[in-house]
Amino acid sequence: MKTYRKPSISKLVAKFDNELKALLMSDLKAIKQAKNQFVNTVNNNGLSAA
């Protein structure tokens, strides 16, 4: 008969933290890309970003 061991709480928290960090990093990367694209568009059109 197989025994099932629950993962420890600390392992679950570590996995959650890693998943959250990956999600936040991908969001930050997308925001930076959008910002850079906007700044480049503004600069190319000769508009003021302020």
Image (cartoon, helix red, strand yellow):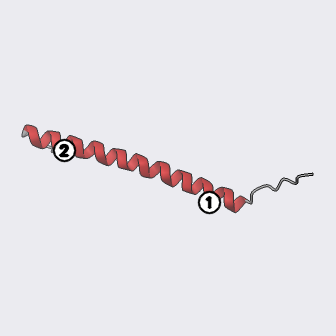
Amino acid type at circle 2 is: Val
Residue annotated with mark 2: 39
Q: Residue at x 31, y 48 (%)?
A: 32
Q: Which residue is drawn at 35% across and 44% down?
A: 30
Q: Badge 1 local density, few (<14 within 10 Å), some, or many (20+)?
A: few
Q: Badge 2 local density, few (<14 within 10 Å), some, or many (20+)?
A: some
x and y, in percent, of residue 23 in the image? 48, 48
x and y, in percent, of residue 44 in the image? 10, 40
Is residue 1 depicted above or below 38 in this figure? below
| Mark 2, secondary structure of its residue | helix
Give the mark, 2 or 1, whose residue is nearer the N terminus. Answer: 1
Q: Residue at x 43, y 52 (%)?
A: 25
Q: How many labels does the image show?
A: 2
Q: In this view, does 39 lie to the left or right of 18?
A: left
The single residue placed furthest to the front in the displayed view is 1
Residue annotated with mark 1: 14
In the figure, residue 38 lies in which quadrant? top left
The single residue placed furthest to the right in the displayed view is 1
Is residue 26 at all visible to an observer of this figure?
yes
| Mark 1, secondary structure of its residue | helix
Q: Is residue 3 left or right of residue 22?
A: right
Q: Which residue is drawn at 79% across and 55% down?
A: 6
The single residue placed furthest to the left in the displayed view is 46
The numbered mark at residue 5 is: none
Q: Is residue 8 left or right of residue 30?
A: right
x and y, in percent, of residue 14 in the image? 62, 60
Is residue 48 at all visible to an observer of this figure?
no
The C terminus: image quadrant: top left
The single residue placed furthest to the bottom in the displayed view is 10
x and y, in percent, of residue 2 in the image? 88, 52
